[in-house]
Image (tube, helix red, strand yellow):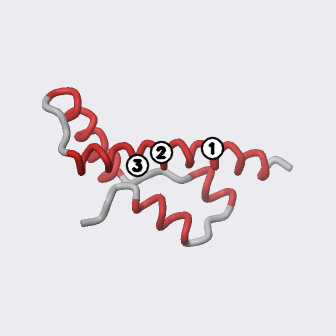
Amino acid sequence: MIRVYDEIVDFIAAGATSDAVSKFQPSQLAKDYVAELIQKEKVEGLTPEESSELEHFMVFEHVMRLAKARAKMFGSQ
């Protein structure tokens, strides 16, 4: 099973440029899955594995936001 945050890890591992970092978006499949997890969390609760996956994705998303901000700074120099 591929974790939703694997897309971010694969993107970083491929050696992305500053421009590519600033334009990165998770796939629609990943966005939909995260939305499902968030909805499920609100309605019925998550399994420990789902909760861990959502938490990891949120951390990676935060890191990507920081990376995008820095990439934009480097791109404007």
- 42 sits to left or right of 10: left
Q: Which kind of residue does numbered mark 3 sit on?
A: His
Name which residue lies at 37% across and 43% down: 55
Looking at the image, tell me whether mark 3 or mark 1 is earlier in sequence order: 3
When asked about the image quadrant of residue 7, the answer is bottom left
Q: Secondary structure at mark 3?
A: helix
Question: Which residue is nearer to you in this view: 21 or 55?
Answer: 55
Foreground tag (1 vs 2): 2
* The N terminus lies in quadrant: bottom left
Q: Which kind of residue does numbered mark 2 sit on?
A: Val
- 57 sits to left or right of 14: left
Q: Secondary structure at mark 2?
A: helix
Does the CB distance between marks 3 and 1 fall below 8 Å?
no
Disc 2 target residue: 59
Q: Position of residue 26 (x, y in %)?
A: 43, 52
Q: Position of residue 44 (x, y in %)?
A: 13, 31
Name which residue lies at 47% across and 45% down: 59
Name which residue lies at 40% across and 56% down: 5
Question: Which residue is nearer to you in this view: 45 or 38?
Answer: 45
Disc 3 target residue: 56
Query: Which numbered marker is on residue 66?
Result: 1
Q: Which kind of residue does numbered mark 1 sit on?
A: Leu
Foreground tag (3 vs 1): 3
- 44 sits to left or right of 37: left
Spatial separation of the CA atoms under disc 1 and disc 2: 11 Å
Number of residues whose C-alpha sits closer than 10 Å to that of mark 2, classed few (under 14), some (14–19) or many (20 or more): few
Name which residue lies at 53% across and 53% down: 24
Query: Which numbered marker is on residue 26?
Result: none
**7 is higher (above) or lower (below) than 28:** below
Number of residues whose C-alpha sits closer than 10 Å to that of mark 3, classed few (under 14), some (14–19) or many (20 or more): some
Does the CB distance between marks 2 and 3 fall below 8 Å?
yes
Residue at far front of view? 48
